[in-house]
Amino acid sequence: MSGQTVTIPDDRAFASFKSECLCEEGWSMNYTKRGITVWSQGLEEGKSVHKIKCQMVCKDVSAETMYDVLHDIEYRRKWDTNVLETFDIGKLTVNADVGYYSWRCPHPLRNRDVITLRSWLPIGKDYIIMNYSVKHAKYPPKKDMVRAVSIQTGYMIQYQGPNHCILTYMAQVDPRGSLPKWVVNRSSHLFAPRAMKKIKKACLNYPEWKQRHNPGLKPWLYPEQTTLPSIPLSELSIQHAESLENIDESSLAETQEREDSD
């Protein structure tokens, strides 16, 4: 979303996101193993915007369960080990809200956070969830965090059968900093595949967990269940990267980290 005014994505925006998820032109494959494939687009010289796309074939997870897991903020706090803090700020429409998310970055980088406008849409038996960064006066950048910018990030879930789906994750993010090359490389070969594996494991455990935690509460499916306050679009503005701190972490050395066994 490159305009100057905050808008709620329309059908054309969802169609455009879906088209890019399906497009192969201009992407370089970096990783493919056991049903997970990762592509990236080359960084322009002097630019910090990183664009990555991951796809995972899940032959034992339904599209509906995947959609629920990606929405359920209470469950995310349980399975997403990178999350530091996440909460919903307010709702805009029945299929759009604003939220906060902060996450751990690999040592020794500083941790990041974002404020995003998130929207979602079921398309037949498929689903799309996507977001982009906005500013909200009550949630300014924190001193101990780097405020990153999501230019456009999201998930597409494709129904493949009763218990079979394909998840595509695509992210165009400005991390606000000159990152070391080892971080960019590990994003494709380690971080992204690991994240996809965590999502799949979370999906497999979700039905049992949900039965014990408000099984009927799914405001992303039943908007009348939401308790979020309504917020007007006028309280939001586009988060421009240029207005945020830009730090140079390019010289930070790589630390040893145990890689998950495949």
Image: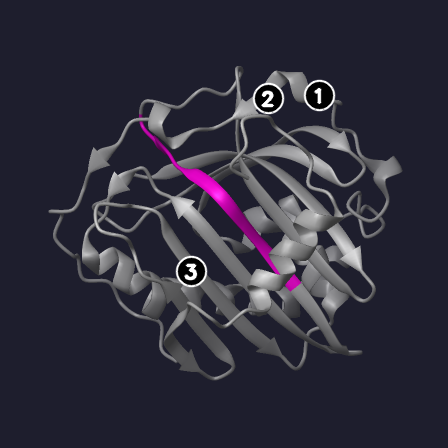
Which quarter shows the N terminus?
top right
Which secondary structure, mark 1? loop
Q: Are marks 1 and 2 in contact (CB under 8 Å)?
A: yes
Camera-side mark, 1 or 2: 2
Q: Position of residue 113 (x, y in %)?
A: 42, 36
Residues 213 and 238: in front is 238
Which secondary structure, mark 2? strand
Based on the picture, tell me whether residue 152 belongs to the magenta stretch.
yes
Q: Position of residue 174 (x, y in %)?
A: 37, 42
Query: Which residue bears the numbered disc 3?
Result: 52
Based on the picture, tell me whether residue 204 belongs to the magenta stretch.
no
The answer to whether residue 71 is visible is no
User: Whole-Å distance between the Cαs marked 2 and 3?
Assistant: 27 Å
Res 231 label? 1
Residue in view at x 20 percent, y 57 percent: 181
User: Whole-Å distance between the Cαs marked 3 and 1?
Assistant: 31 Å
Mark 1 neighbour density, 10 Å: few (under 14) some (14–19) many (20 or more): some
Residue in view at x 57 percent, y 64 percent: 21
Residue range highlighted in magenta = 144-156
Q: In this rendering, is residue 22 above or below 85?
A: below
Which secondary structure, mark 3? strand
Query: Which residue bears the numbered disc 2?
Result: 236
Q: Position of residue 214 (x, y in %)?
A: 79, 47
Q: Is most of the magenta stretch helix, strand or loop?
A: strand
Q: In this rendering, is residue 139 above or below 58?
A: above
The answer to whether 252 appears left or right of 144 in the picture is: left
Mark 3 neighbour density, 10 Å: few (under 14) some (14–19) many (20 or more): many
Which quarter shows the C terminus?
bottom left
